Amino acid sequence: MPRATTIENVLKELDIIISESIANNSRMGLFAYIYRRTTAEIASEIALGNFEDNERLETLDVEFANLYLDAYKAYKNNQKLSASWTLAFENVTESLTIIQHIMLGMNAHINLDLAVATATTMSGSKIIDIENDFNKVNDILFQITNELQDRLSRVSPLLFLLDLIGNNNDEKIIDFSMRMARKQSWNAANLLWSLGDNQNENAIHKLDQVVLKIGEHIKTPKTKMVQFFLKCIQKFETKKVNNIITKLKEA
């Protein structure tokens, strides 16, 4: 199947991944669901013409999505892919919490892929020209984080414990993670863009290694208390992927 060229193509491919994940009871579908929800929101904003350059923003969004879709297909076909995506995919069978599975995907996709996609999209142009739209996407995503975490609470009733033990009362978990990741991604995108197309392969590899370390921390937090609470959270979560996604989709 050729790479996606429009956001509608992206949404259809994400639907395929979600369906495959439900059929195989694979937790790959958890990140795919969250990503589809956020991508659909961006698609709606583009359709309304709410960006400075809607065509360019769609180009970025599709380039961004293709990096995830490419990684998914590479993993399914035993092909080479980034270390950070390898970590996320190889741990889908591990007894991690739902939020950990989602954050492993967010880590690889935002901290690595978004930086690469932004630098690629703005190659030959001034990267500063897309900064306002990049930040507007941040604002749009943050607006739906309460909804996303409320939905996750349906399948992970003790999820609120992570807010409590992290003294994170003013920031929803996904909001905080996405906020920090997108800030880091913008900085990394500027670095890759400044290096140019012929010099950034090594920089991307180094960035991937940094993102891998973050992923390893998401999988196995260093704090024993956090590890304990994660086990408690996981114990009371919905287990079957079909049931999880059904509950997440409910109005």
Image (tube, rainbow, N blue to C red):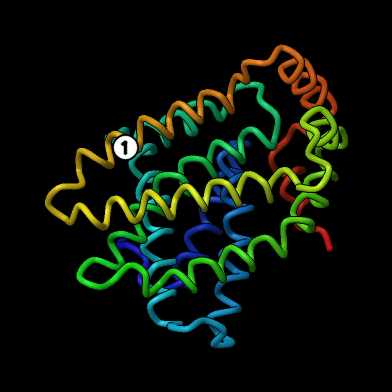
Residue 134 vertical placement versus 238 (above, below): below
Residue at 72% in and 65% down: 143
Residue 43 vertical placement versus 15 (above, below): below
Residue 248 vertical placement versus 133 (above, below): above
Nearest the eye: 132 or 68: 132
Image quadrant holding the N terminus, namely bottom left
Q: Residue furthest top?
A: 224
SS class of the residue under badge 1? loop
Residue at 55% in and 24% down: 217
Position of residue 5 measured from the top left corner of the image (x, y, whole percent) = 35, 71
Crowdedness of circle 1 by 10 Å Cα count: few (<14), some, many (20+)?
some
Answer yes or no: is residue 247 visible: no
Name the side, left or right, on which 95 lies relative to 165: left
Find disc 1 in the rendering and name its residue: 81
Position of residue 133 measured from the top left corner of the image (x, y, whole percent) = 49, 73
Image quadrant holding the C terminus, namely bottom right
Q: How many marks?
A: 1
